[in-house]
Amino acid sequence: EPTRPSNFLRQIIESDLDKGTYASRRWGGSPGDAAHHAQGEPDPAKIRTRFPPEPNGYLHVGHAKSICLNFGLARDYGGVCHLRFDDTNPEKEDQEYVDGIIDAVRWLGFDWAQVGQAAGSAQPFQASDYFDFMYRAAEYLIETGHAYVDEQTPEEMKANRGDFGKPGVDSPFRTRTPAENLARFREMRDGKLPDGAAVLRAKIDMASPNINLRDPAIYRIKHAEHHHTGNKWCIYPMYTFAHPIEDALEQITHSICTLEFEDQRPFYDWLLDRLREGGLISTPQPRQYEFARLNLTYVVTSKRKLKHLVDNGIVSGWDDPRMPTIVGLRRRGYTPEALQLFCERIGVTKDYSWIDYSTLEGCLREDLEHKAHRGMAVLDPVKLVLTNWAEAFGSDAYTEDCTQPALPHSAIAEGQTPPPDRVFKIGKEVWIEREDFEEVPPKGYKRLYPGNVVRLKGGYVIECTGCAKDANGTVTEVHAKVIPGTKSGTPGADSVKAKAAITWVGVQDGVQAEVRLYDRLFTDAQPDAGGKDFLSLLNPGSLKAVTAFVEPSLAAAQPDQKFQFERHGYFVADRADHGVSGKVVFNRVTGLKDSWGK
Ligand code: ATP
Ligand code: MG
Ligand code: MG
């Protein structure tokens, strides 16, 4: 186990474990109220954290930070992390998103647990299971004078809420008796009132400097079918009311969220204090801690904006390799290990900051450097003809096997068996990169030009003799002579000095491939920032597909398999399209070096 750098959350947890803050907890086996928990066994989990996505879209790289954080803390401190679908909002949620979230969490390398359920098969929690309890909690607040039904119009409510430095104004409905409130709330529940006609509000303090404590709404009317509870409810809890209750029922110890919720913490505590007083929840009650969300340059992470890109066909789907979604990053060729490394590296703080996209790419290179087998691919092919081939080897049809290591020595750990060598054929004709030939070489150019001597990497040394061109002056073929006896790995390999070694693919055994050269989706480093029209900042060159040739070991790739195309960068066989009706399709994951600042 690697030792992980400390952070403020680790310090809090370590201190709680030292003090035994959570040592006396009991766990009823499934979420319930205080009585249910009290009947349970001592909680085998030292801490409980949770990752609570709303199933209204696919997860993105920011969620990956939260997942690695919450699951990582549970793993490191003998706890468990709950996956909880925060499905309290009936309208925007969808089973497709639920499935996508489950896939993403598992793919990232994490699993959730429930006591008594085997790892890998535990059910996630879902907030809608707690609607009955939430309703009961709301009635309890009403009965104890802590909540009232407000029937001001939404406009009046907004105006009377006041503003910073300007106290709010009490609603005329604020003085209703508990009995009146209870009757009216039950009418809301029973569908007697239309959407928007009334809300249930916590009765706290309309003059509080914290606007979130100015009688926040906790239940609203919404005549909408819910994907789990169907038409049972036409009132739904507000997020700020539901979330602390979800945490309490699941006996979460450390409820970790992003800093935007810092101002909500007083209400979180207020609500749980009331419910504890009423004996509705068990103790110790959960505590909320905030950290700075991930802001990554060159991407948007708002689900609404990502959905817009999908719905308007600007990208091919949630899993378009240019998307910062977890499915998009996965299809692009990112590995769970790279994302985990990224989350470790950026750390957890309370400081607002931007992380450069190159940090994410750097983590991927670091992971793939030791894993991705090497191979040669020619992305902008022109044919090279070795004009003296038959003279040297007896026949134009003659070919010879070349071998090269799949991983360089430096990428092989001590004691690890190197993978088998790659084998590919050299013959009279090979594909080379168009940029590797210049009829008139610029100063310092070391590759092919008439009279120059270079090595075909892993093959022979050759001497360039010229080229053929079409009527427009475009080079159609490069010509060279092979120098026999100079093959790589043979005793004569160094007998002739080559100025450079160039990559190539044999015409005989090279395989045609579609290679998708992805670039950043936005031209602006902060397309998500306030006020910017993100759609006007799209990079028109974010996808360029080329017809390339790849060596046979690459063409044999399994979907999702990653490679380093020598000199070009890291590529992955596309999960969706590679292998479909025999097509060979690769995505560029990233170049070999950081090109972001440039
Ligand atoms: P959006 O606002 O785009 O709809 P969200 O933040 O509401 O996204 P949720 O599904 O509610 O998405 O988030 C689940 C969890 O992921 C929350 O606990 C949230 O704090 C965390 N999270 C979301 N975005 C980020 C981010 N950029 N960095 C870190 N954590 C994040
Ligand atoms: Mg949300
Ligand atoms: Mg949000």
Image (spheres, rainbow, N blue to C red):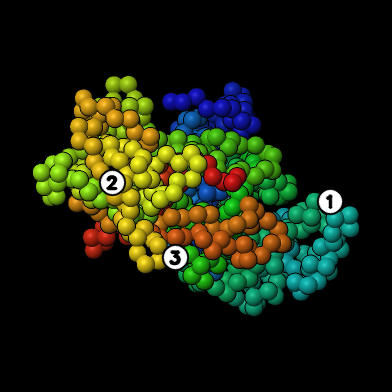
Quick check: can you spot residue 60? yes
Looking at the image, is mark 3 or mark 1 nearer the viewer?
3
From the image, tell me which residue sits under label 2: 480
Residue at 68%, 56% in the rendered image: 529
Question: Which element is circle 3 on?
Answer: loop
The residue most toward the right is: 166
Q: Please give left or right for residue 503 compared with residue 265 in the image.
A: left
Disc 1 residue type? Pro
Does label 3 or label 1 sit earlier along the sequence? 1
Disc 3 residue type? Ser
Residue 534 or 566: which is nearer the viewer?
566
Q: Quadrant of residue 11?
A: top right
Looking at the image, is mark 3 or mark 2 nearer the viewer?
2
In percent of width and height, residue 83 lies at 47, 48
* Residue 209 numbered tag: 1
Question: Which element is circle 1 on?
Answer: loop
Q: Please give left or right for residue 96 compared with residue 146 in the image.
A: left
Work out how far the residue at label 3 is from the one at label 1, CA to CA, in angstroms.
46 Å
In percent of width and height, residue 229 lies at 48, 66
* Residue 321 numbered tag: none
